[in-house]
Image (spheres, rainbow, N blue to C red):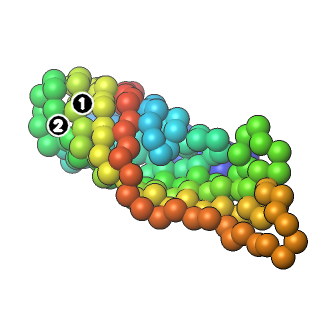
Amino acid sequence: MKKFIIASMIASMMAISAVSFADESSKLKVGGQFDIGAPSGMALGVVVKPKLNWLRLDLAGTYNSEFGLRIGGTFDPIKFPISPTFTIQAGHTFDSKVPGISKSPELGMNYVDFHLGLEVGNRDRWRFFLHAGPSYVSVRTDGFQDTLSVGKGVSIGNPEFHGWVSTAALGFALYF
């Protein structure tokens, strides 16, 4: 499954790149983005700046103890070397066991980020950014009962968390 997701992302990046280079007169710009933050962990993906100069769309593969996917958009309304931005991103981390813990329960996560940001650089060529704000996070577990050694007749359900947390990301976007 992981290989299929990674292959799909690579194929998508190649297809978007081919479309953008086919018509040099188009204002569509394609590039890459890398960032580190919470809750997505490390993210590497493709960014597309459509003909709307104030919008940047991204699709990224993420890694935060397990692989995931993230999609989002950044509103960048001011063409200035230092600019405030607003980013909305939604992501999913696939279920996995916690590394280094034997009999670990499986963890999975969905999240939505609502970040205000400060970006530095030419918005048509590259941007370094710092984004921060609230995220709604939904974490679920599976197999928690197997992790603990509890007495007979005692059962523990799979704990979950659904709520708002403060998050941030630091990264850059570069257009080809």
Image quadrant containing the C terminus: top left
Residue 26 drawn above or below residue 162: above
Could you say which is closer to the camera, residue 39 or residue 155? Answer: 155
- Of the pair 3 and 167, the residue shown nearer to us: 167
Q: Is residue 49 visible?
A: no
Does the CB distance between marks 2 and 1 fall below 8 Å? yes
Camera-side residue: 124 or 80? 80
Q: Residue at x 30, y 38 (%)?
A: 131
Q: Position of residue 26 (x, y in %)?
A: 29, 41
- Can see residue 47? yes
- Asked which secondary structure carries label 1, the reply is strand
Q: Is residue 129 above or below residue 165?
A: above
- Most distant residue in the bottom direction: 153
Mark carried by residue 84: 2
Q: Position of residue 6 (x, y in %)?
A: 65, 44
Identify which residue is drawn at 49% across, 44% down. Answer: 40
Residue occupied by mark 1: 119
Instruction: Give the quadrant of residue 38.
Output: top left
Question: Left of 95 or right of it: where is 139?
Answer: left
Residue in the image at 82% along x and 63% along y: 150
Q: Is residue 38 left or right of residue 73?
A: right
Rendered location of residue 99, percent (x, y): 73, 40
Amino acid at dot 2: Pro
In the image, what residue type sits under mark 1? Glu
